[in-house]
Image (cartoon, grey):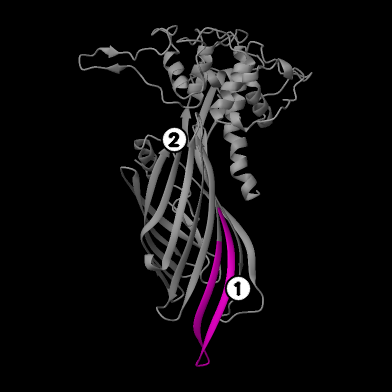
Amino acid sequence: MNKKALGLAVLLVLSFSLQGVAAAPPGYEGGIKNESTYKEVIFLTGEPIVLEGTLDISIRERNNQVTERYTYKLENAEKNAKMSRTVSINKDLQKNGDQLTEKASIISFKETIDVNGSRYEATDKSYQWSKSDIYQNKPGVTYFAGNWDGRKTYTINKNQGKVTVETRSSVVGYDHYWGTTETQSIEYYIDSERTISVEGEAETVRWQGTAVVDASHNRTRDFNYEANQPTQISFRGGYLLTEQQENVLKVTYDLPRLDEEGKLRSRRNAGSTSFSIDTNPVNQRLNVPNMRDVAGHWAEKDILLLTSMDAFTANSSYFGPSLPMNRGEFARAIAVVMGLKVEEPKTTRNSKVTETPSIFTDVTKEDPNRKYITAVYEKGIMQGSGKDRFAPNQALTRAQAVTVLVTTLGFENLAPIQQYSTGFRDDRQIPIWAKDAVYMAKELGLVQGSDEGYFQPNKVLTKAEAAAMMTNFIRYLQQDLRYDYRERILNF
């Protein structure tokens, strides 16, 4: 099990389920990492130095506590710089409903940095540090935010001086089936005081500097249609699902200029830089559906994608894009699209299959969408349609479909409290229970009205329209949400 998956397992043991592999810029020093390489920037010598090497992470969980140990081995041969750092962190976890709070503190710390013959050392006795995060687990997405503050004091060559580095950091992020983004912003305040020898005389040089590091980690699942070049092949092409992690580090600094003797120059060293390291893509070819009644249809690509994922089903070569989308089919689609955990029938020792009793009296054990209906109901994404009934074969309206999508995101409570209009010309026809969801769906760009400005909330959704709506929802999760958590913060 890799380290990120291990971290996820810890939270799962604590009954706080995340939607995918938890992303995080590794450690708490503003670094970025792929499968083999870790990078971060240090400033305590008076210039930004990029260090590169390895970071090993071990995680242990016991009761409501997690212990993490980080071991760094980094260097920059050009700058004649090396770092060795080990840090152990304790986390206290407390769950309250759909929220989890996490408070972290230092157990042990030791860091040694050698640069051009000078050694900078710090230990847990000279490092004050505190971090706290909060996670909120919505039906399809986990959102989180946190802050940490630290003060680290290094000695220079034992007795030649000291460097104090104060840090303030904030972090925001989300995690779901289609992607994860965490962006960490760290402000550095550096105060250095060092005794140097100038022409045989001892002289104290003091300087201050600042820096800002933005480290962002992003995991994205994406899909592309791959057409086959040969014409004599049984299928024209199919969808490729690719998962990759992107890691971006942006640095802005205002530091002193020092000469070869270590004395201050008149001008400052100010500037900015950025770099990134990515993981190798992981590819998965999806099944190729054999449907003949969607060729040339305006929603052909959306239908093929959702059917390839098994979110929609087709009867042999027939899909029926103009047929109504029913509640059971939509439950299946949202469960598959969001990668919800679906309970499978269990097999006993005598090879008998034991079925979990159905929650709804009108959902039989032969219903192919039964397990998906159970999954979305238990997540709070879709409700029943009366006492012990789900109405799986009932046609779905546009208002109902939009409500499901917004509930999955957990954004239904972000609509205005006072009286408001959704902006659609048929605003008064939108059911009261769906109005907040329709408002948010329009704000997020998940739905658009007709050319005349109507939403048509009570219109039955066709299977083709459901495919287009679901694909648009996936694109929102992949792109728009990431933009708000990464590009807008980093100003790329």
Determine which quarter of the picture holds residue 365.
Answer: top left
- Residue 466's label in the rendered image is none
**Spot occupied by residue 421 in the image (x, y as percentages of width and height):** 73, 25
Identify the residue at the far front of this view.
Answer: 418
Which is in the foreground here, disc 2 or disc 1? 2
Q: Residue at label 1?
A: 256
Neighbor class of circle 2 (other Cα within 10 Å; few <14, some 14-19, many 20+) is many
- Would residue 202 be found to the left or right of residue 428 on screen? left
Check disc 2 and report its element: helix, strand or loop: loop
Residue drawn at the location 36% of the way across and 19% of the way down: 344
Q: Is residue 466 magenta?
A: no
The numbered mark, 2 or 1, whose residue comes first in the sequence reads: 2
Check disc 1 and report its element: helix, strand or loop: loop
**Spot occupied by residue 178 in the image (x, y as percentages of width and height):** 52, 32
Marks 2/1: CA distance?
44 Å
Q: Which residues are magenta?
A: 188-214
Asked if labels 1 and 2 touch by Cβ distance under 8 angstroms, the answer is: no
Residue drawn at the location 55% of the way across and 71% of the way down: 46
Determine which quarter of the picture holds residue 320.
Answer: top right
Q: Amino acid at mark 2?
A: Leu
Q: Amino acid at mark 1?
A: Pro
Q: Residue at label 2?
A: 18
- The vertical placement of 95 against 272, above or below, is above
